[in-house]
Image (cartoon, rainbow, N blue to C red):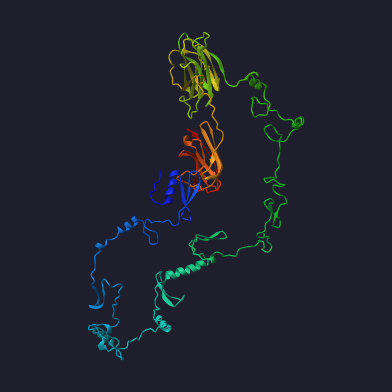
Amino acid sequence: MKIQYNGSSKILKRLVELVNRSQNVALRQDNTDKNTLYWTGLDGVEITVNIPSGAVEVDTELSETSTNPVENQAITKELAQKADKSVIPTVGDGVLSVQRNGKSVGTFSANAAKDTAVNISVPEKVSELENDAGYGTYTKPAAGIPKSDLASGVQASLGKADTALQKHQDISGKVDNTAAGADSLLSKITNSWTATPTDNTYFIRQDTSSKNEFGRVKFSTLWSYIKSKVESLGYTKNTGTITGIKMNGASKGTSGVVDLGTVITAHQDISGKQDKSTAVTHTANTAVGSTAKPVYIAADGKATPITHSVNSDVPSNAKFTDTTYSDATQSTHGLMTAADKKKLDGIAAGATKVAVDSALSATSTNPVQNKAVKAALDSKSASGHTHAMITNSMLNIGGANNAAKWVCLGTLVSGGDARSALIRVWSGNGFNAGAYQNASFEIQIKDGYQSTPSADRACGVTVYRINCSTAKVKVIPTKHNTYTVWVYLPWAYWNGNYAVYGRYTSWTYNGSNQTAEPEGTAADTAYYDQAFLTSTVAAAKTLTDSGWVAMTVEGYAKSGTVKYRTYGKQITITGSAVLKNDIATSYPAPQYIASTTFDFSKIVGCSGVGRSSSGVGAYVAVENYNGDNLVSVYALGSKIAAGSTLYFTITGFID
């Protein structure tokens, strides 16, 4: 795309020529001198363009502050929005009159007068009114307003007031508002009232907490107050009933009031009783004896602890009784006899009873019986026997009789989940010493895991066939770990042999054969034919390595090293460069830091993220821009300041 300029400015014409020549220009204006422009081409060279201060700047719209000329189209646009003189109506040169109450107070001409003020005066007192016929004045007499000057309604009210209080009010018999008066009033209350008070009976009370006030209060309220005061002193009402009274063990009554005068009717005989002054007493809160030293009562009546200590020199359950002991027997404890002592003395010091085990044990430290050891050894193999896994080798298969048949090799019992058995079959079509007659196949049977044991999906089968693509295998699970193995031998003379290898519990040989396919559901089976004999591996190809090739550092970079390397169809570009200009997050033209003659137009996916010493990340990519092969950079997040060092490595492919 080219820019066309039809104006007469030589400076603008020159700028257009520069833009059209490079087709890739970065143009910016100086921040302080608006007449200075900076242009940067693809080669990274910056050109300064000064616009003379005498140049005419034309405004594109009307302004109240600008001193520049205005574009014709802006003026025309504004004038189009104004009314034409021919459509504005004219006003006659009349006189406008301002009146108050029908009288003129000012006039002005409609076309000649401007900013004219008219003062309309407003009366401030009655005397200034021009028409006061409906208004009057009143002067108050010095002696006051006579009744005759008042309205008739007011005169009637005053007449009634004259006769309102015409005689002295009689207050004889009234109580004086004094203490004596109150006492006199209260003394008049009857004192002959004899009715029994109830909860609802009222009493007069005086409240003196803040002022003298009298009132009535119910007896129930007064009683509750008295009761609460009594109970606060610890006295409570006893609601129980006396059901019986005894004295010295004898019943003196069953309920109600007991007359103590009848309880003690005779002098209690205390002859023979110990005098209190000579009685032995025990001082309260004073311990005597302990749990280990019991107490007894001495002759003087005092509590006295014994001298022995329980659980020390006296057993806690000791009984002081005579005991007779018999000689000990094999079933009863007793005293040792002389014969027993003699026998004991004949036993050597340190001698113990020898316990001999009757069976082998993995934990016992006792000797074991000879016959038990012999029986265990007889069940073992000879010392020269070794094995790595269970193998049934070279078992025969025969009975071809000039017909292809199904042969039952036998029954396998697996060794458990994930255990495998391998059956190798050697057969073929005849035995005339021809290599083409040889064929073999392997059958791998792997036991499968089942949460509930079942013949369904009990195992998986894989068959690897060599020179026998029509041979078949049918493994029929009959239990979760038991499988019958059949093979179909498609030749007339298929006699041969097989072997069984792997981790399995047992193999039972069968050897029977039949023409029809055996009945039963076969396990999941997969076949692989001669894969390792017919596969072809492509020849290795040596990739061409270009070695590291230096690129030209230029554009937005002022120094550094940028290089590329091709290895076959792979290209890697790496480098570090010190930036000459700021790197923005986006720009209409490439912000390139290096170039090369290597054709980048066929490179695919050669881009990546780099880093700068300023901490801002960079997106680095290769591009072919107008025939130039460039390594371009864009800042991630914010600009990368000039002077920062950029580091990167990117990889792509050559299409």
Q: Please indicate whether residue 41 sits to the left or right of residue 146 in the image.
A: right
Q: Please indicate whether residue 281 sits to the left or right of residue 449 in the image.
A: right
**Residue 128: x %, y % from top left:** 27, 83
**Residue 97: x %, y % from top left:** 24, 75
User: Height in image: 583 above or below 331?
Assistant: below
Q: Please indicate whether residue 154 sits to the left or right of residue 586 in the image.
A: left
- Count all numbered tags in the image, as a single digit: 0
For residue 136, what is the image quadrant?
bottom left
User: Height in image: 595 above or below 213?
Assistant: above
- One can see residue 341 in this view: yes
| Most foreground residue, 4 or 408 | 4
Q: Quadrant of the N terminus?
A: top left
| Most foreground residue, 335 or 301 | 335
Q: Residue furthest bottom?
A: 143
**Residue 645: x %, y % from top left:** 56, 45
User: Height in image: 250 above or below 500?
Assistant: below
**Residue 504: x %, y % from top left:** 54, 22
| Most foreground residue, 565 or 453 | 565
For residue 155, what is the image quadrant?
bottom left
- One can see residue 638 in this view: no
User: Height in image: 139 above or below 324?
Assistant: below
Q: Please indicate whether residue 310 sits to the left or right of residue 6 in the image.
A: right
| Most foreground residue, 178 or 198 | 178
